[in-house]
Amino acid sequence: MANLRELTKKEELLCGGHRACAGCAAPIAVRQALKAVDTPVVVGCATGCLEVTTTIYPFTSWRVPFIHNAFENAAATISGVEAAYRALKKKGKITQDIQFIAFGGDGGTYDIGFQSLSGAMERGHDMVYICYDNEAYMNTGIQRSSATPKGASTTTSPAGKVIPGKTQFRKDLTAVMAAHNIPYVAQAVPSHWNDFVTKVQKALAVKGPAFINVLAPCRLGWQFDPSETIEIMRGAVETCFWPLYEVENGTWRITHKPREKKPVRGWLEKQGRFRHLFRPENEHIIEEIQADIDRNWEALLARAGMA
Amino acid sequence: MPFKEQREGWWKVMKKVAITGNEAVSQAMRQINPDVVAAYPITPQTEIVQIFSTFVADGDVDTEFVTVESEHSAMSATIGASAAGARAMTATSSQGFALMWEMLYIAAGLRLPIVMPVVNRALSAPINIHCDHSDTMGARDSGWIQLYSENAQEAYDNLIQAVRIAEHPDVQLPTMVCMDGFIVSHGMENAELLDDGVVRSFIGQRTPKHSLLDVDNPATFGGLDFADWYFEHRRQLAEAQTHVKDVVLDVAKEFAKISGRSYGLFEAYRLDDAELAVVVLNSAAGTAKVVVDDLRDKGLKAGLLKIRLFRPFPHEEIVAALAGKKAIAVLDRADGLSTMGGPVFVDVRSAMYDAPGPKMVNYIYGLGGRDIDTEQIAGVFWDLAKIAETGKIASPVTYLGVRE
């Protein structure tokens, strides 16, 4: 359990002055994640909004050693750094304990970087991979990814006259990562900071690979007011669109169960990307989305022994 | 020698050995004892990672061996390890090399002294596992240093020297050591290995200026350059290439002291007084030397230039060595598909633009492992003799040994 008073005393390892949009959840997620770190940490990052907004030469927002390599290989890159650490520590050239975190957006994690991630997790590197999931390729201008939810309008799944936004449901990456049977997998969101920071602490504490999928709304891509970021995150949890849970050594546990599961309709309504769903001819898609959420939530309750 | 030693630890007792190119390279890697090797199997390189795996399994090296899920990840992890201050290596061929391509540029752009043996193999399609140089030629503009090796001995020697070249403070560039797939990688030859201790003191320790694991001095690697800085950083990369030549020669001089074997930027074989010259890389040079000797016996003034350092391209020295020849044929084991010849030809001819006189022609040969024989190379020299005599070039680019 994280303590807010203690956390605020810790140095910000991602400093201000970066160029992320107002209301962007990615830097919030990173700052919270880095608050969970007690030892020196090396950070790797996939190409994406987080990397381009924080490392514009000759500036950097990172007060920790940082490497960006390419789009699809944050996990492979950090696995190399971690291997170097083990080698140099064995030889006595490094004496400190160092932690390793890789960040990637959903494009760099669910899609193009999935092979690299899967490989690194299978090999058992002692690292934490955190996917900041903003549900589309935001850096290139809001193109659909396999994390984009059904019905969302993006620039490559635009709501048109005959196709009403993205036609497929999203990939359940957190469950896919749990199927890798690694020591720790979790799903989190920065609006529930204590839940998230605690999960990062747990992920860092385990020996071996850990994966956290953190929802990070993009105010441009999701089309909401920058002041509403935290509210949008809360809505994702309250509707059970984004349940908060962890899988620790194979045991599934829901870490926050909403008192009352709210209908998804109200949450969709707040986001411009779903605007077209409220036309009469598309209303059925909202029902499909609700049915999908219900099915997934029931399945999660069953996995967690709460059904 | 007891059987077990012969089988498992022969290198501990023998120095002059019959060895394949892959075995020789693996031995060099064992002696280099890299901190990290991240690699993936691909024919004909696979043997290197297999043999190296046994060194890891038997504790003959201290290396952290990262068995990645692709060559893209092999190079990505090697980049991560090198940025972390480790001495990091990988090895590949052909399609695997092609899959690394994106990362090759990043390794060079980040100025990471990674060393990589490449066992040259043709690129698909059609799929073909045998030798040509299409793979590494495709990366000749990537910023990597490229050293080519005629045989197992040269591959072994080049790999050890590559560590020093790559890590030299004036260079700081990744370096690939190329040898011909199957012809050298799987062919058994005599070679002389150095003592482990000699190699280890020759290569010394890597002392990086910046490292990801220097947590007290955090640095950002791989940041974003806009138009206001990208050009300067690429200019620095170009500047580093100009330092390579001298470092290659200095390292070769030191290497000669420990090995008795001398290396230059290229090998000039009976070239000084030659009127007709062939330029070639890798194993075909061995065949060409036989032809040169034979033709010399017949009174033809034939000579050979075998390029060792192809990137950066030692153009001044090559021009000096080839100036005054009557006719030159460049043999390319890769086709540029530009309709104006293979990559080595294009470079050599461009370098020769300001040199007086020689007529130059190109022969594309040996693609996909097609053998080149002495008669074909002799035929090239006879073509050159005719060009020298008449001053006329019938065909600037010829496909040698192909069904037309």
Image (cartoon, coloured by chain):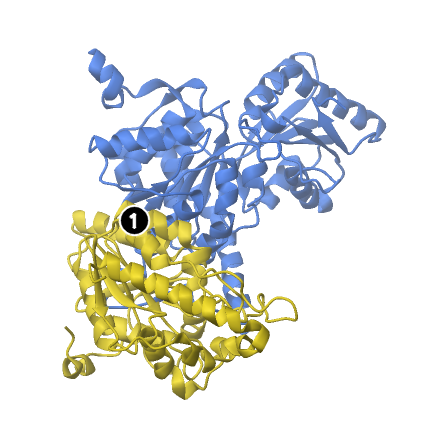
Chain colours: A yellow, B blue
Q: Mark 1 belongs to which subunit?
A: A
Residue B291, quarter of picture: top right
Q: Residue at x 59, y 37 (%)?
A: B134
Is residue B90 positioned above or below A86 on the image?
above
Q: Taking A86 as reference, is A138 left or right?
A: right
Find residue B110 and report its horizontal and vertical position in percent.
43, 58
Find residue B360 and report its horizontal and vertical position in percent.
74, 35
Q: Residue at x 23, y 32 (%)?
A: B57
Find residue A255 and report its horizontal and vertical position in percent.
21, 68
Is residue A125 positioned above or below A35 on the image?
above
Which amino acid type corresponds to the residue marked 1 in the rendered image? Answer: His
Q: Which residue is mark 1?
A: A180
State which quarter of the image contains the C terminus of chain B: top right
Give whichever of A127, A160 is nearer the camera.
A160
Find residue A156 and report its horizontal and vertical position in percent.
58, 66
Q: Residue at x 41, y 71 (%)?
A: A50
Number of numbered discs on residues: 1
